[in-house]
Amino acid sequence: MKKLLIVTIIILSTISFSLASDTGGVFSPMILNARSAGMGEAYVAVSDDLGALIYNPAGLVDFPLKIIGFNHLQIPEGFTRVEFIGGGINLPNISLGFGFQNKGVISPEELLYPFSENAFQGSFAKKINPNLSLGGTIYLYLATLDTGSASGFGLDLGAIYNLNPNVKIGVVLYNPISFISWSTGTTESAGRKDLVIGTSLKFQIGNIPLLFAFDFSFFDKMYFYQRLKLGLESNIPKTPIALRMGYNGESNSISFGLGLKAQRLQFDYAFLYTKDLSNQHVIGFSLEF
């Protein structure tokens, strides 16, 4: 199965090099998960909660039996607000997920034209064997801007391989096929196009459990550091508290996060500091059934 994973990575790499790097324009990537935000969005190999809907659909197989959650991104010095609601269920032979994201403005009356971006998604994943899982996500895009309205679709493909109980490798190809068609006659691709490979490592220092994650983007960036994302999470022993920190080279940001779990309810918060944009706050709630 290791050979199968290597072949999959090679195929995805070949496809990716035929595409142009694109992270701007309509439906540009936004932070839709508070836990991943606190870890610098180094999440391709982690993806064991609702973040799998955003970063790697293959991680759906690690969901609880049923889960639903909500996340909110707030940019204090900007007009943008972003909400995401999603959920998932593990069935005997397949794992399924759904999501809806909405991007709008805090005070529509202060904007001189209408603006909204909405995306509906359906995700699926399946274990090929005890170590390898594959998944995909299909998106329906709907947008409104001063120039008109638009609709389109996108597709993500992902895989996760468990080298052992403590080490995972993940790979995702974002939007190898996508289009956004405007009422004005213009057609463009969705904002996030990338091939990302990530690893996650669980280990302990004394009695303190740690989770380290690293993601690398294969798409061209202006600077090499923009390809890198790093994340660290630690659960404080004998408490429901998790502390997180991360670095995101793509957004040139440093992040800090906090998690709190009370039985089946999970609360997450992340603060992002960046020199290029205003600081951001992300909050999230999820409930397991």
Image (spheres, rainbow, N blue to C red):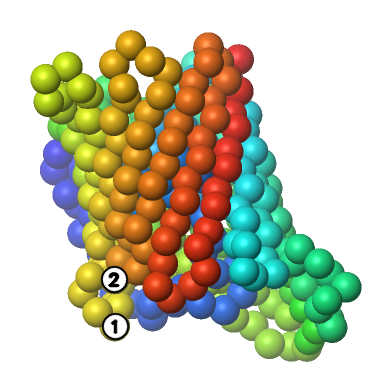
**Which of the 4 image quadrants contains residue 110?**
bottom right
**Disc 1 designates what residue?**
222
Q: Amino acid at mark 1?
A: Met
Q: Are marks 1 and 2 in contact (CB under 8 Å)?
A: yes
43 in relation to 264, above or below: below
Residue 144 sits above or below residue 55 on the image: below
Q: Name which quarter of the figure residue 264 lies in.
A: top right
Rounded to the nearest whole Å, what is the CA distance between mark 1 and mark 2? 7 Å
Counting other residues with Cα less than 10 Å from the Cα at mark 2, is it few (<14), some (14-19), or many (20 or more)?
some
Can residue 259 be seen at all in this image of the molecule?
Answer: yes
Q: Does any portion of residue 140 appear in the rendered image?
A: no
What label does residue 226 carry, if any? 2
Task: Identify the image quadrant of the N terminus.
Answer: top left
How dense is the environment of label 1, judged by Cα within 10 Å: few (below 14), some, or many (20 and up)? few
- Seen at 60% across and 23% down, the residue is 287
Residue 147: x, y in percent?
A: 78, 86
User: Of 8 and 26, which appears nearest the observer?
Assistant: 26
Q: Label 2 sits on what residue type?
A: Gln
> Relative to residue 94, is residue 179 drawn left or right?
right
Residue drawn at x 51%, y 35% is: 268
Position of residue 210 relative to residue 10, above or below, is: above
Mark 1 secondary-structure assignment: loop
Q: Mark on residue 11?
A: none
Above or below: residue 210 compared with residue 288: below
Q: Quadrant of residue 69?
A: top right
Counting from the top left corner in percent of width and height, residue 45 is at 30, 42
- The answer to whether residue 225 is left or right of residue 79 is left
Q: Quadrant of the C terminus?
A: top right
